[in-house]
Amino acid sequence: MLTSSHTWAGSSKDPNDELFGDIVESTDLDEMDRYQCVFVGEPYDQGNVTGRPGARGRPRALRNALEGTKTHHFDNGPVESIGDLGDIAYPMGLSISDAQSAFLDVTKRVHARDSLPIFLGGDHSLAYPNARPLLDLYESVGVINIDAHTDVRVFYDDQPHTGTPLRQLIEEGLDAYAQIGARQFGLSTPYIDYVDEHDIEVITAEDVYLDLDESVQRTLTAMDGVDAIYVSFDVDVLDAATAPGTSSSEPGGLRSIEVYRILRQLAGDDRIEGLGVYEVAPTLDSNGVAINTSARGVAQFISGYQTR
Ligand SMILES: [Mn+2]
């Protein structure tokens, strides 16, 4: 169910340094509410249908990158109180649909607790099991998806995949959906029609480039009236030149500094009930740049969350 193989340890020779490796502690479902936030690893990339998988090794790579990251934000102070539940284990050979169910069995139990889950994926098909339990726990739920892609595609061969999680959530009752970082020429007309029919708020990467704070405000306006918000951070929202280590990298995207500000601002909303980080593929990465960029993104989100 949950397997813990990572031992967090600080690695600095300087006694003045405090790293994530020094403060993150292993925990379990019974004890996790001792921490404000908990990591949940999801080493799964079989939902990837691009022919360029590679996100499976991601939780380990992300933990390694965070381990050496210092804890202090200039304005918000040091982050603290982070537990690690380990990785969700699943049998080999499952269909994508059955894998989503296997993850959902565990994510339900995680969401039933108070601590904020931070899911370390994994491909984006996991956004479905990671957000789905909130639909049963709250009257109304919204998702803010920081992503190049809208991920409302149809199933292929009757199976969900990395391009379907938001469509699945919408069809099961999601109340509000805002995507930030969309690329032009990324969706065909039938999907644009789906976006319009379901009142999805699509904010392009160009919108962010022109006015970041206004763009964040548009995502939150789209969340008016919802009780709980899940944030999905698909690293392919970053420009292809900034984060080559992802399966569906696209030009015309965001810079890391923009993603950090978006993550930190969204984390300050008091309805946030989860974050997922997806699609970093260490085997496709160049010098660990996508991994390090998203590890700092997690740090920014936690910093924003803990100073609400
Ligand atoms: Mn994407």
Image (tube, rainbow, N blue to C red):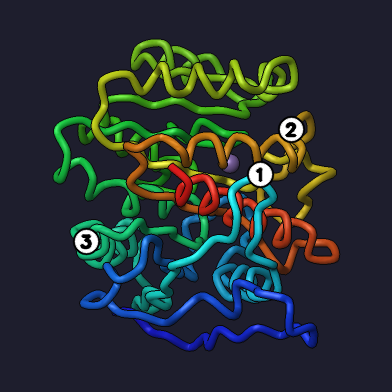
Is residue 52 visible to us here? no
Ligand 1, seen in the image, is in the quarter at: top right
**Distance in Å between CA atoms under marks 2 and 1:** 8 Å
Q: Which residue is mark 1?
A: 236
- Of residue 118 and residue 128, the one placed in the foreground of this image is 118
Q: Position of residue 125 (x, y in %)?
A: 43, 51
Question: Which of labels 3 and 1 is toward the front?
Answer: 3
Q: Are marks 2 and 1 in contact (CB under 8 Å)?
A: yes
- Residue type pointed to by label 3: Arg
Write the residue at 65% across / 60% down: 72
- Residue type pointed to by label 1: Asp
Q: Which residue is mark 2?
A: 253
Q: Which residue is mark 3?
A: 113
Which numbered disc, 3 or 2, marks the residue that appears first in the sequence?
3
Write the residue at 47% across / 56% down: 47
Write the residue at 46% across / 51% down: 306
Q: Are marks 3 and 2 in contact (CB under 8 Å)?
A: no
Against 21, is 298 above or below? above
- Of residue 176 and residue 248, the one placed in the foreground of this image is 176
Q: Position of residue 99 (x, y in %)?
A: 33, 64
Would residue 160 appear left or right of 57 to someone viewing this image? left
Write the residue at 30% across / 79% down: 28
